[in-house]
């Protein structure tokens, strides 16, 4: 990972989407597209964010399954925020499985939480509850942990 990508990722992690965009705005490689998509989502341009994340997922090569899976999780989060509950749940489930297999437990937990939230919103309470059996929310960041607690309630 090059230094601009690393710096942009750090900026996003600290809540600075404009700082991230300054570093990757003119780049069209897969990691830059993904970071631009996340930055646009943080800024509220969900349509553009979704398009950028789709492009990033396509641009990552076959050996970059974890990166593609992370893009799918980010797309699912955007869909949930947009109240687009018709997004393909199978894609998110496959992404979660990929993340678990590759040891990315934080993003896998986030994907599981998104699955449960979607099921709750579409009225499939038993399925949402079963998704959370044995789920450890301590791997989630604080904001996601709060959303998880709302699902539990």
Image: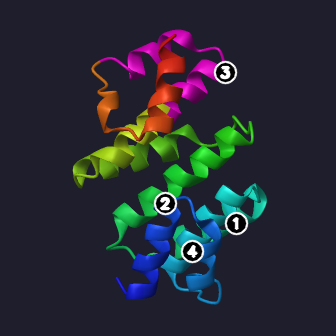
- Please state the horizontal and vertical placement of residue 95, each as a whole percent of the image: 42, 50
Mark 3 / mark 4, whichever is N-terminal: 4
Q: Is residue 121 rendered magenta in the image?
A: yes
- Please state the horizontal and vertical placement of residue 144, each as a whole percent of the image: 48, 36
- Please state the horizontal and vertical placement of residue 3, each as a whole percent of the image: 39, 86
Mark 2 / mark 4, whichever is N-terminal: 2
The disc placed on residue 20 is 4
The 10 Å Cα crowd at callout 2, few under 14, some 14 to 19, many 20 or more, is few
Mark 1 / mark 4, whichever is N-terminal: 4
- Please state the horizontal and vertical placement of residue 82, each as a whole percent of the image: 74, 42
Q: Provide the residue designation for mark 2.
A: 14
Which region of the structure is painted magenta?
Answer: 114-133
Alpha carbon separation for disc pair 3 and 1: 25 Å
Q: Foreground: 130 or 146?
A: 146
Mark 3 / mark 1, whichever is N-terminal: 1
The disc placed on residue 122 is 3
The 10 Å Cα crowd at callout 3, few under 14, some 14 to 19, many 20 or more, is few
């Amino acid at each position: 990972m090059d230094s601009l990508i690393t710096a942009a990722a750090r900026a996003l992690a600290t809540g600075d989407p404009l700082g991230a965009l300054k570093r990757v705005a003119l780049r069209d490689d897969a990691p830059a597209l993904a970071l631009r998509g996340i930055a646009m989502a943080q800024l509220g341009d969900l349509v553009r964010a979704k398009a950028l994340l789709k492009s990033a997922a396509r641009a990552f090569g076959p050996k970059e399954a974890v990166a593609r899976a992370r893009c799918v999780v980010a797309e699912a989060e955007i869909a949930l925020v947009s109240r687009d509950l018709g997004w393909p749940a199978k894609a998110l489930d496959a992404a979660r499985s990929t993340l678990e297999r590759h040891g990315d437990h934080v993003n896998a937990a986030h994907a599981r939480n998104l699955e449960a939230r979607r099921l709750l919103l579409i009225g499939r309470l038993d399925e949402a509850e079963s998704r959370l059996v044995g789920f450890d929310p301590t791997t989630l960041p604080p904001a996601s942990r709060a959303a998880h607690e709302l699902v539990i309630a």
